[in-house]
Amino acid sequence: MCRLFLTTVLLLGFSAASRAQQAVPPAHLADALCSCMGSIDPQSDDRSFDLAVRHCLSTAMMTHSGEVIELMRRYPSQDRQLYLLGLLLGGALDRSCPDYPLIRERLLPRFSSEKRASPSI
């Protein structure tokens, strides 16, 4: 569930990154994520594509966990720190990762349909 949330925030975060207090994401984390996303086969089936994106997110977050923790410590007043992280990474990837727009465009329609299909509480 957390991975789905982080994936959604990451994909949608590019448009709102400027509102994230002009924060800068950890460079190594964004670089690792971009590098991994560049290795994803855009022609793969949906399931394989989703798993590859989740693998990239999980691996980058685990490998650079110190940077993630430091970023969360830097903004202790933020209620939704994972949301802030998604905004920052989404913005950084949108600006500097040539493969990110392809990944985002492929995933966005499925996330939009999942939101509509989920029941209202």
Image (cartoon, rainbow, N blue to C red):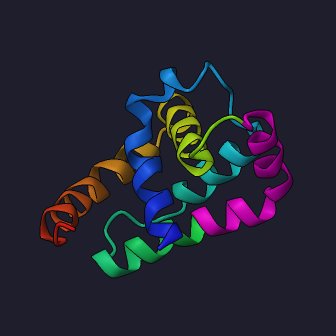
Magenta stretch encompasses residue 67: yes
Q: How many marks?
A: 0
Residue 52, given in percent of the width and then of the height, sits at 49, 72
Q: Please tell me whether residue 98 is drawn above or below residue 104 in the rendered image.
A: above
Residue 6 in percent (x, y) is at: 50, 58
Q: What range is drawn magenta here?
A: 57-76
Main SS, magenta residues: helix
Whether residue 33 sits left or right of residue 11 in the image: it is: right
Residue 87 located left or right of residue 107: right
Q: Residue 43 at x, y = what percent? A: 31, 68
Name the residue at 20% across, 57% down.
Answer: 112
Q: Residue at x 42, y 67 (%)?
A: 41
Q: Quick one: quadrant of the C terminus?
A: bottom left
The image quadrant that residue 72 belongs to is top right
Which corner quadrant of the image does residue 57 belong to? bottom right
Q: Quadrant of residue 89?
A: top right
